[in-house]
Image (cartoon, grey):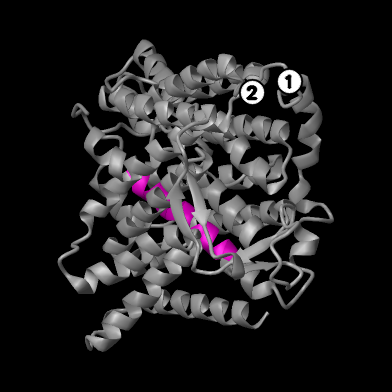
């Protein structure tokens, strides 16, 4: 990205976005806004496909994704005056569905309530010194490992959603929900399989699998060639190819119109506060530790994902300067643009949960718009307008098959792996905790368990090396809470 002059104070007299001071124009901001939108528009299709697996109505999530993206991105542009876009994050919706709803057995209404609390918590820590304590307590290498681990997790989900894997198991290792070892008639029964299960590739002889492979290749080729909107182009192409193959079924029972989506929206709107949401979430003291640990995992993942995006893309472009980064760990309130951006991100998470979606976060794909010349919040305003227009594409979007969206998950996962390069893997003192945070996350199919493993290994290594005093008190408290969580899960 090109170097530019330092940013001027927000909202100077006569120019709300300070276009002249930021060496940009309305036309350039419009192009940047469109570039950002097309780089991240895949989330409009992917997010409903992921959250619907938790039992949420597809059409409602589709609209919630768009509305939360519009709200979050407008707050980012109008309040913080920075060219970043927000929408429900892939890592967060995966955690929402596969870990919290499927593994921990919370309802999607309860999980929305957790996301709302997470947003409120992040707002509080953004305007107080608590944020500073949390940020400085976690070693830099662990932050990078967590980011890379989320990348592996997302890519693995993409590979599974593409239908490329099947699992070979010993029949005697099946443990159906009724406690017997009979294999018959368990097609609709929840079962647990031991570590005897081994993943293997499926036969590459079905239309869906072949289209997924074509989508993976096309997506990666377009990304390597730096084609704007590469992921969106690939999704559209595979969806079109799926029509003659019988995989994409337009105007079928699975396709949803905009009017149908609007009718479904009340099912998720404010569901976090309904009888199946907040009241039920805190109705049992037995599951309170798990609830608190899950909210904590939501908050930490959301916060560090956003901080990494802002620092990683803003410094080189001149969006943020060194004073912004210093204030991130030392200041409080809204003293800098980065403070305002973090506040906008936290607000968007709470807004999204009210509408009916997982954590709304700042998208790293915003870097595409910044690279195209975006320098102010006007870029975000243009991105929001395009999100609004995308709502009218509901019938087409709802027909997109998983083999078309799975490559997007794999591609985003690959891009997130770049965080691993910042870890010194030759130093076991640094590599072991990073392995716990990064690799366990995917292998345990849980973002929170990966973070917990990294923190626990870090404390153990420091203790045996005689460096216990180097562990920040805040990190030690967080680690003990994670250990308590595992104890609780072992008992209940």
Residue 231, how many percent across, how many down? 42, 26
**Quick check: can you spot residue 351?**
no
The total of numbered circles placed on residues is 2
Give the label on residue 6, or none: none
Residues at discs 2 and 1 in contact (Cβ within 8 Å):
yes
User: Quick one: label 2 or label 1, which is nearer the N terminus?
Assistant: 1
Q: Which residue is mark 2?
A: 399
Query: Measuring 53% from the left and 24% from the top, which residue is drawn there?
Result: 384
Residue occupying the far right of the picture? 275
Pick the front one: 318 or 358:
358
Residue 469, how many percent across, how many down? 28, 85
The magenta stretch spans residue 401: no
Q: Which residue is mark 1?
A: 252
Q: Quadrant of the C terminus?
A: bottom right
Q: Tell me: 487 left or right of 442.
A: right
Residue 194, how many percent across, how many down? 54, 69
The magenta stretch spans residue 305: yes
Residue occupying the far top of the picture? 27
Please rate how many residues cluster around mark 1, counting C-alpha atoms within 10 Å: few if below 14, some from 14 to 19, many from 20.
Answer: few
Q: What is the magenta segment's predominant secondary structure?
A: helix
Establish if 452 lies above or below 212: below
Query: Measuring 78% from the left and 20% from the top, which residue is drawn there?
Result: 259
Establish if 5 lies above or below 382: below
Establish if 115 lies above or below 46: below
Query: Measuring 79% from the left and 63% from the top, which residue is drawn there?
Result: 280
From which residue to which does the magenta span run? Answer: 294-310
Establish if 155 lies above or below 1: below
Residue 50, how many percent across, how many down? 59, 41
Q: CA distance from mark 2 to mark 1?
A: 8 Å
């Amino acid at each position: 990205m090109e170097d530019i002059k330092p940013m001027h104070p927000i909202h100077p007299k006569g120019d709300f976005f300070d276009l002249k001071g930021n060496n940009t124009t309305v036309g350039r901001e419009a192009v940047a806004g469109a570039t950002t939108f097309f780089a991240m528009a895949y989330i409009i299709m992917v997010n409903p496909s992921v959250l619907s697996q938790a039992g949420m109505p597809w059409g409602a999530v589709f609209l919630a994704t768009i509305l939360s993206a519009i709200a979050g991105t407008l707050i980012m542009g109008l309040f913080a005056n920075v060219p970043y876009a927000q929408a429900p994050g892939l890592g967060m919706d995966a955690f929402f569905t596969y870990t919290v709803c499927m593994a921990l057995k919370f309802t999607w209404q309860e999980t929305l309530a957790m996301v709302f609390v997470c947003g409120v918590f992040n707002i509080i820590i953004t305007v107080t010194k608590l944020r500073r304590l949390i940020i400085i307590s976690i070693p830099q290498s662990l932050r990078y490992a967590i980011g890379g681990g989320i990348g592996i997790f997302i890519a693995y989900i993409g590979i599974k959603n593409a239908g490329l894997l099947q699992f070979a198991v010993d029949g005697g290792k099946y443990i159906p929900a009724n406690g017997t070892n009979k294999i018959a008639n368990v097609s609709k029964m929840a079962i647990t399989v031991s570590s005897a299960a081994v993943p293997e590739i499926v036969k590459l002889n079905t239309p869906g699998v072949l289209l997924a492979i074509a989508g993976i290749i096309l997506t990666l080729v377009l990304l390597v060639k730096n084609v704007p909107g590469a992921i969106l182009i690939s999704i559209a192409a595979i969806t079109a190819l799926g029509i003659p193959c019988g995989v994409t079924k337009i105007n079928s029972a699975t396709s949803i119109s905009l009017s149908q989506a609007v009718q479904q929206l009340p099912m998720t709107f404010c569901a976090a506060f309904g009888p199946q949401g907040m009241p039920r979430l805190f109705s049992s003291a037995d599951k309170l530790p798990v609830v608190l640990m899950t909210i904590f995992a939501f908050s930490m993942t959301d916060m560090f994902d956003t901080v990494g995006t802002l620092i990683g893309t803003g410094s080189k472009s001149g969006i943020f300067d060194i004073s912004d980064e210093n204030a991130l760990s030392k200041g409080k309130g809204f003293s800098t643009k980065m403070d305002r951006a973090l506040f906008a991100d936290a607000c968007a998470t709470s807004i999204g949960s009210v509408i009916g979606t997982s954590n709304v976060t700042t998208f790293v794909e915003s870097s595409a718009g910044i690279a195209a010349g975006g320098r102010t919040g006007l870029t975000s305003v243009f991105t929001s307008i395009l999100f609004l227009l995308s709502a009218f594409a509901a019938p087409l979007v709802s027909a997109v098959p998983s083999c078309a969206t799975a490559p997007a998950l794999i591609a985003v996962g690959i891009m997130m792996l770049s965080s691993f390069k910042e870890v010194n893997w030759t130093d076991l003192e640094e590599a072991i905790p990073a392995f716990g945070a990064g690799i366990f996350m995917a292998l345990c199919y849980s973002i929170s368990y990966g973070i917990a493993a990294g923190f626990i290994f870090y404390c153990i290594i420091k203790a045996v090396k005689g460096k216990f005093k180097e562990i920040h008190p805040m990190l030690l408290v967080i680690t003990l809470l994670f250990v308590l969580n595992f104890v609780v899960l072992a008992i209940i």
